[in-house]
Image (cartoon, grey):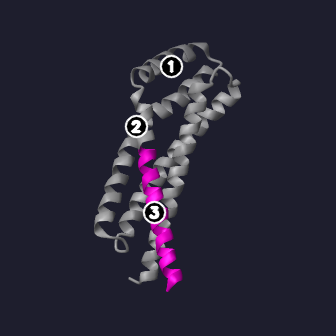
Amino acid sequence: MTDKKQKNRNMVFRIIILCAFIMGVRTIVNFITLMGGYEMLSSESLLDTAMGMTIDYGVLLFLSVAAFIASIISREYVDKKYFVTRTIALFVAIILTIYSLPAMTETTLVVSTRMSEFAFVKDVLTQDLLQYVVNRPHMYYTYMISVIILLVLSVTSVISMLKSNKIQYNN
């Protein structure tokens, strides 16, 4: 395989990792907005924020898996120790993100059922879901740890990209 093709694969990995980190930050911002200021939000804004958080979370999960695959595909271009480290870090980030899946989706369900016109469904569904979410608050924070892992991988990817570009310009 050509060196240029491997460099391109590694660049794709770097772009995906950066996008995953950005989506993780968006998810955290929506989470803080939703949990910190839900009294001030109108019902439409509340639903938009909850849906945005869930969609951003889904994209974060998708991009994390894509980064894992891109890491494996571009393994020939990077040092073996770095490859193993970043692949394990991505695997841990994916597991932590998946662990938060019930909390993220149930938050959106709670908000949408709160706005429902059917009082019976609203009371029953909201009560069970709220109890589940209240008893497991740590489920919200595990994906935030994965965003920190993605931050570290993004920073190291950008630094290595800048170093490799500096070497190319000096030659």
Q: Is residue 132 left or right of residue 87?
A: right
Report which residue position mark 1 lands on: 125
Which residue is disc 2 drawn over? Answer: 142
What's the magenta region? 146-171
Up-down: is 154 above or below 110?
below
Q: Residue at x 43, y 56 (%)?
A: 153
- The quarter of the picture where the N terminus appears is bottom left
Give the Cα distance between marks 3 and 2.
23 Å
How many discs mark residues in the rendered view? 3
Residue ID for mark 3? 157
Q: What predominant SS class does the magenta segment belong to?
A: helix
Q: Front-most of 159 and 99?
A: 159
Image check: 162 left or right of 119? left
Residue at coordinates 41% horizontally, 41% vertically from top-left?
145
Determine the residue positioned at 69% across, 30% down.
45
**Quick one: label 1 or label 3, which is nearer the N terminus?**
1
